[in-house]
Image: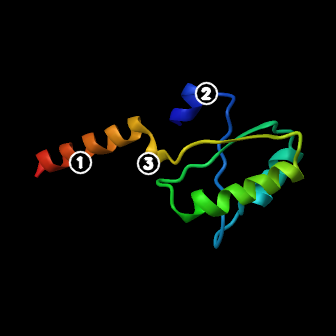
Amino acid sequence: MLLLMRKPGVTVKLAFLELMTPRLPELVAQLAQDGVRELVVPVFLGPGGHVLHDLPLMIDQLKADHPRLSIKVVEAIGENAGVLAAIADYCVGAADAQ
């Protein structure tokens, strides 16, 4: 709902790298077929094995498979200073509520 208020024309879809569906390659293929031209990936909490190793290989393949699609890879959300500050504020607030 917050996204719809801030960016009414933006669509957000959820995909996974493994074990769950839809997998990122299948969703990207569908989005490309639907005419999407820009994609931002990912929302990972931290720079673990997926972000450091699996995702770059998958993104390279997706870019090769869908050359008209612009795929922007952003930092793990847990590495963003604003997110870290919000988490710290939440923790301090939770501690104060005790």
Q: Which residue is mark 1?
A: 91
Up-down relation of residue 60 to residue 23 (above or below):
above
Tell me, yes or no, if residue 8 can be seen here.
Answer: yes
Q: CA distance from mark 2 to mark 1?
A: 29 Å
Using a 10 Å C-alpha cutoff, classify the residue at mark 1 as few (fewer than 14 neighbours), some (14 to 19) or many (20 or more): few
Helix, strand or loop under label 3:
helix
Q: Position of residue 16 (x, y in %)?
A: 64, 61
Q: Position of residue 77 (x, y in %)?
A: 49, 45
Residue furthest to the bottom in view is 19
Q: Which mark is residue 68?
A: none
Taking the spot 53% from the left edge, 37% from the top edge, the residue there is: 1
Question: Of the residues shown, which amino acid type is indicated by label 3?
Answer: Gly
Q: Which mark is residue 78?
A: 3
Helix, strand or loop under label 2:
loop
Judge left or right: residue 24 versus residue 31. Answer: left
Q: Which residue is mark 2?
A: 7
